[in-house]
Amino acid sequence: MTGRLLLTAGILIYIGAYCIYGQFLERVFDVKAGRPTPAHRHRDNVDFIPARMPVVFGHHFASIAGAGPIIGPVLAIAFGWGPVFLWLLLGCILIGTVHDFCALMISLRHEGQSIGHIVEHYLSYPGRQIFLIFCCAALVLIVAIFSLLIAKTFLTTPAVATSSLLFIICALIFGVMTHSGLLNLRLGTIIFVPLIFLSVGLGSALPLDLMQITGLTMNSVRVLWLIILFGYIFAASVLPVWILLQPRDYLNSFLLYAMMLLGLVSIMVVAPPIRIPFFEGFHVTPATQTTGQWSLFPILFVIVACGACSGFHSLVASGTTSKQIDQETDARPVAYGAMLLEGILGMITLISVSVLTQADYGTILKTDGPVNLFAQGLARLGSGIGLPASLGETFISLTISAFMLTTLDTATRLTRLTIHELVLPPHGSKPRRPYLFKTVFENRYSATGLVVILAGYLALSGDAGRIWPVFGAANQLLAALTLLVLTVVFRAQAKNIFIVGIPFLIMLGVAGWALADLFFTHWHSGQWPLCFISGFLFLMAVVMTGHAILEFQSSKKRGTHGSGL
């Protein structure tokens, strides 16, 4: 088996799914280009603002990609490349794309509201509140884990910090100039995309090494970077999307495209042999641990989240992307297409690591971590087409850090928007006098500050290695709850509920199993913050599922149906 054959098969199957299953889902929702979208109806130039499809695609893809489709396959390949490849293929087509596209479409049909707010239309106000609380807890985990990963990268590779700073400056200038009309999108792209790649080179030449500049210890510098990052995401969350979020995501997406193109060309030209075994067993000891084992069920389906299915995607789709869609026909390339492209990134990661020997895989993963392992594997493939391995490794590391930062600021904004929705009164009720709790949560500055405080506490009290499994389980359970909401909507509209119902049952089973197992693991090890979060998320999921079942039964007796799609 060669990497070329594996990747070619995966891409061809994905293209078939986009043309056949993607078009089928468009018919389910009766997608029409002329139907006005929330971005036009509720334009406020802060959160609601229509953008061209390539811009929205860049924001959406850069936001959902992050480090998930890289870290997940790198860790899960301990089971062998076969199970990972099959999950990336089948999970992406039958679960992930359905999850992402349907979440975006029901948000478009409900005035750009988030999935959590839509719950009230089809279940109840308490159901909405439970779902939103679950989303807030999961998003705080995401902000914490990505803050830790980025801070570690800035600490160990100072060139990444310089490049990231230059990226932000370029994005701010690009956003102001294109929004004001001084540059159109095409000319702005021609000018600023080369500047983004130039920033990569300048970062390597002028690394921002805070240890050398300040003379502080490694741990102190890590804390300093966390403080700087939390200051950045605070600003990114409260600024209008056209100033930083849209332009940064759009420009950064070109780095990601370039890295994926490097992977595609290298794999197709070199045709590397797969050295990692197809299947290692149902129980394996990961290279990062000296004791304990992972079970194929459910760990594989929790670790490999992005690239197959991820609950975070629904929050991006309904939280920010639906507020920027110019016309409904953009939904399939943006949501369905981006999910398939993320699956391809997962396959590139899988092949880049599979060309290493089992011994090299374990050694590099243990010493350098999953991101550097992927960078080294892909750089070795790139050397086969003439790219120096050292330059390739630097570029890949910088690219990964760039879109990790994109995911971080998007997640912060999403958490802020979710907090806003928590204090909204039940639909149709009379407005009540504002009280302190409501006033604080409605204010975008104080709500963002609350997110920063909670994520900061979690980041400073733990490490990425302990938080990642909990994040993975929470993320997949969030996908299950989103699919539960979609099942309720489909049932209310007499649609084929099996499209979303079967994926819901699969994701609920594996994610609930994993989260319960993590609760007892952290209980016995005394990791109380993560133990509390695991138990809390599991309890919220049980309550939400039970509430949906009861509402199913009562609505059947009443014979009621929800509002139209």
Image: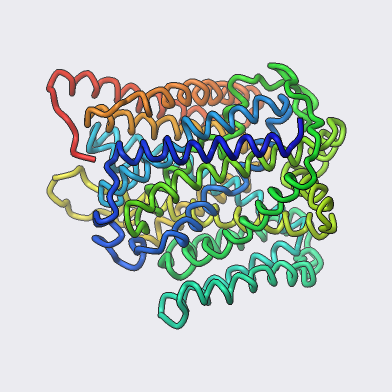
Question: In x, y percent, where is residue 512?
Answer: 49, 23
Q: Nearer the viewer, residue 416 or 324?
A: 324
Q: What colour scheme does the image use? A: rainbow
Q: Nearer the viewer, residue 415 or 287?
A: 287
Q: Residue at x 61, y 56 (%)?
A: 257
Q: Residue at x 12, y 49 (%)?
A: 430
* Quadrant of the image occupied by residue 13: top right
Q: Is residue 27 found left or right of 302 in the rendered image?
A: left
Is 293 placed above or below 287 here?
A: above
Q: Residue at x 44, y 50 (%)?
A: 333
**Which quarter of the rendering shows the C terminus?**
top left
* Quadrant of the image occupied by residue 135: top left
Q: Is residue 18 found left or right of 556 in the rendered image?
A: right
Tag count in the figure?
A: 0
Question: In x, y percent, where is residue 339?
Answer: 51, 43
Q: Residue furthest bottom?
A: 182
Q: Residue at x 43, y 36 (%)?
A: 20
Is 9 placed above or below 156 here?
A: above
Question: In x, y percent, where is residue 60?
Answer: 48, 53
Question: In x, y percent, where is residue 246?
Answer: 47, 64
Is 121 placed above or below 459 here?
A: above
Q: Nearer the viewer, residue 374 or 512?
A: 374
- Whether residue 211 appears in this view of the structure is yes
Q: Is residue 75 found left or right of 178 in the rendered image?
A: right
- Whether residue 471 appears in this view of the structure is no
**Which quarter of the rendering shows the N terminus?**
top right
